[in-house]
Amino acid sequence: MKIAVVTINQPSLNSASTLLNYLKDYKVDIYGKKDLTHSLDNLITYKKLDDILPTAWEEYNAIIYILAMGAVVRKIAPLLKDKSTDPAVIVINLDLTKIVPLLSGHLGGANRLSDILVSRLPNSINFISTATDQTNTLAFEMLAQKRDWVIANIKPLARISNRLINKQEVKVATYLNIFNSIPNKDNLKLIGFKDIDLNSVVIAPTTQSKDALWLAPYVYLGLGCNRDTPMEIIDKSFKLFLEKNNLSRFQIKAIASFNAKKDEIGLLEFSKKYNFPIEFYNKEDINSLENKFSKSASTKFFGLKGVAEPSAILVSEYKELIIPKEVYFKSVTIAGAV
């Protein structure tokens, strides 16, 4: 996290110099007015706050202000764009004991940074105003952030959060293993993807809904192929798979296959082309799965339950198959899991 600390006078610059000692594991730039006394190696000076704030807004992940909160509100108001892109904004008093995460508490990380500051600064307290934090309510944007899910449609977030805070039901269209992994399921109801409405959250790689809060987890692929299948055929199969299932290659987290494919040149070249991590699983790993898989030629030749489908499950995070295997050019099989 790249942090700017903005000061306005000698006392606030003195406080910033002290604060710097507690943020040595971060990249921190301190801004102050000219002609003030300091022992900093590199103070970025300015004449007017308005001269530096627009650039700081774009360049830093977090901005810590040691000045009056009212002044901060007035100065940042013209810079506000979107809660998914605005930097974290924190206001701290001169003696570094009162910490207020003012903006971008969740997605921008202001609440998290405030907690870190409180854990380091002596006798300090933070004032977090975010309702979900105060009521210990599930915050879907934080869940997505922690799990590296893409927040593909954030517009309904406030409506969904308010329903949960008010103890009203929120429908969740997702896969059983993902739903079961949610830590706080108070007032959540698992539904099918055909039952999505305005009060729904979709946790899936794709969705047809434009109104629901949509969080997109990564997809993991299992691949099987005939011996000596060229990389070009695997690549064409991959692109057809993406097109058919409305996926982007950037949604693919990793790929996997059977151990016997470790020296398959086409498969290795394909992995290298897209920089996909690739895992190979042995017979015992694959046959240990209790799932029922599609019929596979690998059963006859290797005594396996399958290749593409079980490999996808083994490499995935939530161990749930979401796209059964599909065959391309009679030589490549691809399956998807989350």
Image (cartoon, rainbow, N blue to C red):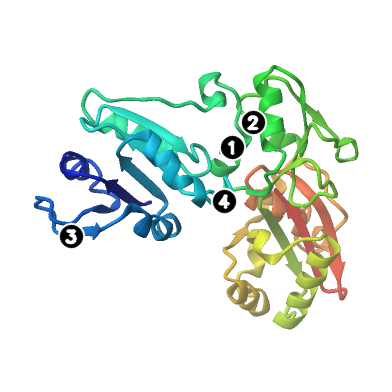
Labels 1 and 2 touching (C-beta < 8 A): yes
Q: Amino acid at mark 4?
A: Lys
User: Which mark, residue 182?
Assistant: 2
Cα distance in 3D space between marks 3 and 1:
38 Å
- Residue depicted at x 28% and y 52%: 28
Eyeballing the image, is 229 above or below 255?
Answer: below
Q: Amino acid at mark 1?
A: Leu
Q: Which residue is mark 1?
A: 143
Q: Nearer the viewer, residue 67 or 233?
A: 67
Q: Secondary structure at mark 2?
A: loop
Residue 295, given in percent of the width and then of the height, sits at 88, 55
- In percent of width and height, residue 131 lies at 56, 24
Q: CA distance from mark 1 to mark 2?
A: 8 Å
* Secondary structure beneath label 3: loop
Indicate the secondary structure of the residue bearing disc 1. helix
Residue that lies at the very extreme toward the right in this rendered image: 194
Q: Nearer the viewer, mark 4 or mark 1?
A: 4
Residues at marks 2 and 4, CA–CA distance in whole angstroms: 30 Å
Mark 4, residue position: 81
Residue at image position (66%, 29%) is 161
The reply to whether discs 3 and 1 touch (Cβ–Cβ < 8 Å) is: no
